[in-house]
Image (cartoon, rainbow, N blue to C red):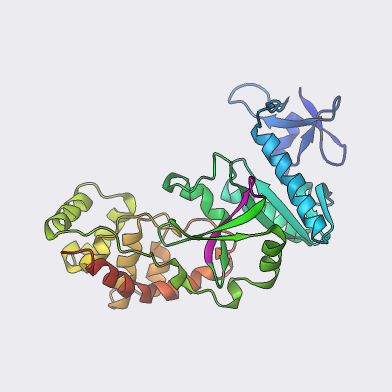
């Protein structure tokens, strides 16, 4: 079909969607069911009905059941909780609207950092505070290293808990906060009722004094011999990533080599939670700042940050201050990795 209704029942053609500032929800003019916008590589754009969820529990079934369960729990706790609420002025429909002040979105489908930031800005413009919960049963948001990029925009900082991924656990109908370390690995798991989570988000935030030491890994990792250290150096030199190549060029300009760096830093192999680089690249840059080879401004420009709406507001600068001192803590961890 080439026409659909949007939230205010205005009829729109599929060819007009690209000109919209933000994409609203679309509905079939005949049956009034939700339809999706499709833009094929060739041919005209169009609208199509969503596939019906199976009786065994498709993703749309879980999404709907989660919203209803959340609304029931919040109402029993004394909140006014409405589902599928159209928000005037921004062409958005909230999963849950709580006390006409909070919007709670439970996410099962993939979403880019840009779209998440746009939705957050839209709701703030309309006077709402927006909270996200990830569907625990979503195949797109499993706690795996391969999913780190898509998970990162949903990470929420808490002053007392660290950087946490908030999940809605469908089976137990509660919220699970997975505290992450520098590598994006889950550590402590906090289990809260939905009303308690809402209260936590209203009472606390990173502005109260976020402590980046929450992100320190619990264990240093496996023991590495001197011979394995040499193989690690060869691995970096033979097959450097783009970020590692930039670091090697920087070391060359400073008349340094990998062998001039503390061994414990080079041995860190995991990816970084906050940036696109391997974490050892961050630590080496912080070490070079500490030793006076680079300035903190150089460090800020050298890092390819992951997109995150909260980090853009000031938490990034706090992290840079912390990182310039944290390398020594990782050096102590790394020393325990050598025989």
Query: From the image, which quarter does the C terminus lie in?
Result: bottom left
For residue 225, side relative to residue 87 (left or right): left
Residue 122 is drawn in which quadrant? bottom right
Instruction: Pinpoint residue 222: horizontal percent, then vertical percent.
Output: 25, 58
Read off the magenta span.
162-172
* Residue that lies at the very extreme toward the left in this rendered image: 227
Q: Nearer the viewer, residue 241 or 208?
A: 208
Residue under the point 87% across and 41% down: 8
The reply to whether the magenta stretch includes residue 37 is: no
Residue under the point 46% across and 69% down: 214
Vertical side of 38 occupied by 181: above or below: below
The reply to whether the magenta stretch includes residue 170 is: yes
Vertical side of 24 occupied by 230: above or below: below
Query: From the image, which quarter does the N terminus lie in?
Result: top right
Quick check: can you spot residue 96?
Answer: no
Quick check: can you spot residue 177?
Answer: yes
Q: Nearer the viewer, residue 42 or 325?
A: 325
Vertical side of 148 occupied by 189: above or below: below
For residue 103, side relative to residue 40 (left or right): right
User: What kind of secondary structure does the magenta stretch mostly adopt?
Assistant: strand
Instruction: Pinpoint residue 132: horizontal percent, then vertical percent.
Output: 65, 54
């Amino acid at each position: 079909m080439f026409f659909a209704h949007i939230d205010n029942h205005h009829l729109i053609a599929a060819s007009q969607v690209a000109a919209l500032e933000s994409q609203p929800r679309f509905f079939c003019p005949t049956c009034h069911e939700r339809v999706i916008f499709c833009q094929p590589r060739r041919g005209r754009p169009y609208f199509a009905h969503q596939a019906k969820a199976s009786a065994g529990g498709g993703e749309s079934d879980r999404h709907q059941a989660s919203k209803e369960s959340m609304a029931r729990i919040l109402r029993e706790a004394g909140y006014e909780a409405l589902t599928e609420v159209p928000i005037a002025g921004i062409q958005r429909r909230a999963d849950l609207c709580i006390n006409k002040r909070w919007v709670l979105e439970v996410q099962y489908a993939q979403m880019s950092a840009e779209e998440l930031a746009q939705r957050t800005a839209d709701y703030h413009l309309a006077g709402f505070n927006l909270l996200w919960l990830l569907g625990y049963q979503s195949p797109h948001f499993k706690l795996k290293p391969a999913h780190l990029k898509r998970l990162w925009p949903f990470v929420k900082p808490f002053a007392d808990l660290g950087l946490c991924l908030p999940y809605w656990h469908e089976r137990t109908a509660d919220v699970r906060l997975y505290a992450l370390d520098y590598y994006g690995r889950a550590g402590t798991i906090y289990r809260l009722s939905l009303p308690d989570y809402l209260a936590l988000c209203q009472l606390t935030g990173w502005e109260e004094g976020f402590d980046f030491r929450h992100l320190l890994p619990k264990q240093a990792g496996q023991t590495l011999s001197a011979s394995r250290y040499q193989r690690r150096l060869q691995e970096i030199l033979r097959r450097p990533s783009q970020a590692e190549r930039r670091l090697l060029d920087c070391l060359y300009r400073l008349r340094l080599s990998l062998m001039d760096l503390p061994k414990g830093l080079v041995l860190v192999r995991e990816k970084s939670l906050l940036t696109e680089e391997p974490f050892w690249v961050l630590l080496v840059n912080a070490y070079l700042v500490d030793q006076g080879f680079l300035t903190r401004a150089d460090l800020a420009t050298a890092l390819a940050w992951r997109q995150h709406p909260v980090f853009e507001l000031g938490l990034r600068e706090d992290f840079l201050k912390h990182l310039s001192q944290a390398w020594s803590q990782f050096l102590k961890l790394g020393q325990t990795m050598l025989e």
